[in-house]
C-alpha cells in the first residue's frame, strides 16, 4: 500500500498545486491540564499525540503540511521551518502574500514541497518541539521518522490523502498549540466571511458548477473535501451531477476525454497546471463545452494571487479567495 501511495505522489501533488522564532505568542502558556503537557491531540491518523511543554517555555514548530504554516501564523505562532507547497519562494518565507507579514523579521527555513520526500536531517537540525503535517499524504514510515524528531500531528482519522478540510486543519493545529478556543474563534471568523459572500450573491443558490483543471494529458474536477469545490458549494452552488457519477481519488475526479462533458455545468472555474492560461483556453475539448461557449467560466491564471489563495485554502487566504471568486462568478452569470 505504501508503494502505491509513492507511485501516485507526483500526480497528487500536481493536482494539489493548482496550487527562528515561535514562542512568545500564546503557544507557551496554554495547557491541557497535565503539568507535563502543553496539549494532547486525541484524534489523528496515527492515534493520540501529546505535545510536551517545552523546557524553555518557547514552542518551536516545524510546519510541513499543505498550509500548516499559514494556520500556525493565523494563531500567532511563527514556525521555524515551512514546506513551500505552492512555490512562493524563500523571499516570501514559503507562504502567500496574505501571510508573509505575520513572520515579521523572522526568516524560517523554507523546504521545497515534500512530494518527493522529506529532508529529515534538516528538520531535526531545527530542534522542533512539534511537527505539523495535517494536510499531507498518510505514510506510516514518514510518520515514524518524523515522530522520532518530535511529536507529529496529522489529520483526523479517516481523512484521505491531502483531503483535510480547512476547518478540520485549523482545529488540529489549534489543539496541538494548546489554543482550542482561539482555533474555534478563527474558524467562526473565516466562516462568517464565506457566509457574507453567499448572502451577497443569492443568485448562486442551486446553480450547477464545477472547478476543473488540466495537467499533462489529464483533465479533472475537484470534489467534496477539496476547498476549491467546497467554497463553491458554500456559496450556494451544486456540484454538476455527472461529476458525482465519477469515482474520485480523494479530493479529485480524473476525467477521460469521453468524460469531459461532466465539466459542462451552468458555471465553471478552470485553471491550468503546467500550461499557460491561453493554452488551456484554446484546448479543443474544453472549447467544445457549452459553458465555455456561453462565457460562463472564470479562468484563473496559474500563479496569480487569487489562484494561489484559492489553492492554499488557509484561514488567511480564504477571505481573499472567497471574495475574489464570488465577485468573478457573479460577473460571468450576469
Image (spheres, grey):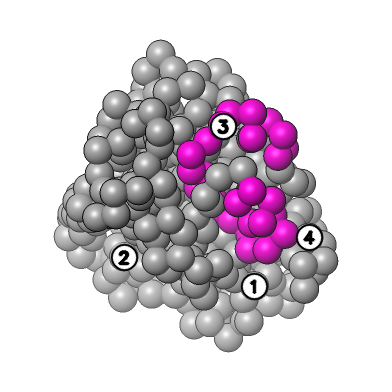
> Which residue was labeled with disc 1?
249
Q: Is residue 141 magenta?
A: yes
Compare marks 1 and 3 and give the one earlier in the sequence.
3
Pick the residue in front: 333 or 187: 187
Label 2 element class = helix
Q: Is residue 172 above or below residue 26?
A: below
Label 3 element class = loop
Compare marks 3 and 2 and give the one earlier in the sequence.
3
Q: Residue furthest top?
A: 105
Pick the residue in front: 114 or 140: 140
**Would you call the spot at circle 2 few (<14 residues within 10 Å), some (14-19), or many (20 or more)?**
some
Q: Are marks 2 and 1 in contact (CB under 8 Å)?
A: no
> Which residue was labeled with disc 2?
234
CA–CA distance in space, label 1 to label 3: 35 Å
Q: Is residue 3 above or below residue 323?
A: below
> Which residue was labeled with disc 3?
127
Compare marks 4 and 2 and give the one earlier in the sequence.
4
What residue is shown at x 52% (from left), y 50% (from top)?
Answer: 151
CA–CA distance in space, label 4 to label 1: 14 Å
Q: Are marks 4 and 1 in contact (CB under 8 Å)?
A: no
Q: Nearer the viewer, mark 1 or mark 3?
A: 3
Q: Position of residue 82 (x, y in %)?
A: 55, 34
> Which residue was labeled with disc 4?
6
* Residue 218 image-quadrant placement: bottom right
Q: Nearer the viewer, mark 3 or mark 4?
A: 3
Label 1 element class = loop
Label 4 element class = helix
Q: Can residue 252 be spotted in the picture?
A: yes
Horizontal side of residue 27 vs 252, given as left or right: left
Q: Is residue 327 magenta?
A: no
Q: Are marks 3 and 4 in contact (CB under 8 Å)?
A: no
Q: Which residues are magenta?
A: 119-148
Amino acid at each position: 500500500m505504501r508503494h502505491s501511495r509513492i507511485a501516485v505522489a507526483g500526480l497528487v501533488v500536481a493536482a494539489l498545486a493548482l496550487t527562528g522564532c515561535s514562542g512568545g505568542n500564546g503557544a507557551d502558556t496554554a495547557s491541557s491540564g497535565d503539568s507535563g503537557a502543553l496539549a494532547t491531540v486525541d484524534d489523528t491518523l496515527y492515534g493520540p499525540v501529546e505535545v510536551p511543554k517545552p523546557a524553555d517555555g518557547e514552542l518551536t514548530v516545524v510546519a510541513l503540511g499543505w498550509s500548516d504554516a499559514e494556520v500556525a501564523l493565523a494563531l500567532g505562532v511563527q514556525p521555524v521551518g515551512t514546506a513551500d507547497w505552492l512555490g512562493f519562494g524563500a523571499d516570501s518565507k514559503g507562504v502567500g502574500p496574505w501571510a508573509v507579514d505575520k513572520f515579521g523579521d523572522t526568516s524560517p527555513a523554507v523546504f521545497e514541497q515534500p512530494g518527493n520526500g522529506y529532508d529529515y536531517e534538516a528538520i531535526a537540525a531545527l530542534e522542533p518541539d512539534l511537527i505539523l503535517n495535517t494536510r499531507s499524504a498518510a505514510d506510516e514510515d514518514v510518520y515514524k521518522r518524523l515522530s522520532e524528531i518530535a511529536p507529529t500531528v496529522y489529520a483526523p482519522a479517516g481523512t484521505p490523502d491531502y483531503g483535510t478540510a480547512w476547518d478540520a486543519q485549523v482545529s488540529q493545529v489549534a489543539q496541538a498549540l494548546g489554543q482550542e478556543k482561539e482555533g474555534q474563534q478563527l474558524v467562526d471568523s473565516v466562516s462568517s466571511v464565506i457566509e457574507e459572500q453567499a448572502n451577497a450573491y443569492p443568485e448562486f443558490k442551486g446553480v450547477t458548477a464545477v472547478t476543473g483543471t488540466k495537467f499533462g494529458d489529464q483533465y479533472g474536477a475537484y470534489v467534496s473535501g477539496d476547498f476549491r469545490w467546497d467554497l463553491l458549494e458554500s456559496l450556494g452552488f451544486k456540484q454538476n451531477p455527472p461529476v458525482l457519477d465519477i469515482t474520485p481519488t480523494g479530493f479529485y475526479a480524473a476525467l477521460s476525454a469521453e468524460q469531459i462533458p461532466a465539466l459542462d455545468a451552468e458555471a465553471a472555474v478552470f485553471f491550468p497546471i503546467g500550461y499557460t492560461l491561453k493554452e488551456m483556453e484554446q484546448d479543443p475539448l474544453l472549447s467544445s463545452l457549452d459553458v465555455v461557449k456561453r462565457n460562463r467560466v472564470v479562468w484563473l491564471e496559474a500563479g496569480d494571487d487569487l489562484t494561489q489563495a484559492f489553492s492554499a485554502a488557509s484561514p488567511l487566504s480564504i477571505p481573499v479567495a472567497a471574495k475574489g471568486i464570488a465577485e468573478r462568478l457573479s460577473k460571468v452569470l450576469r
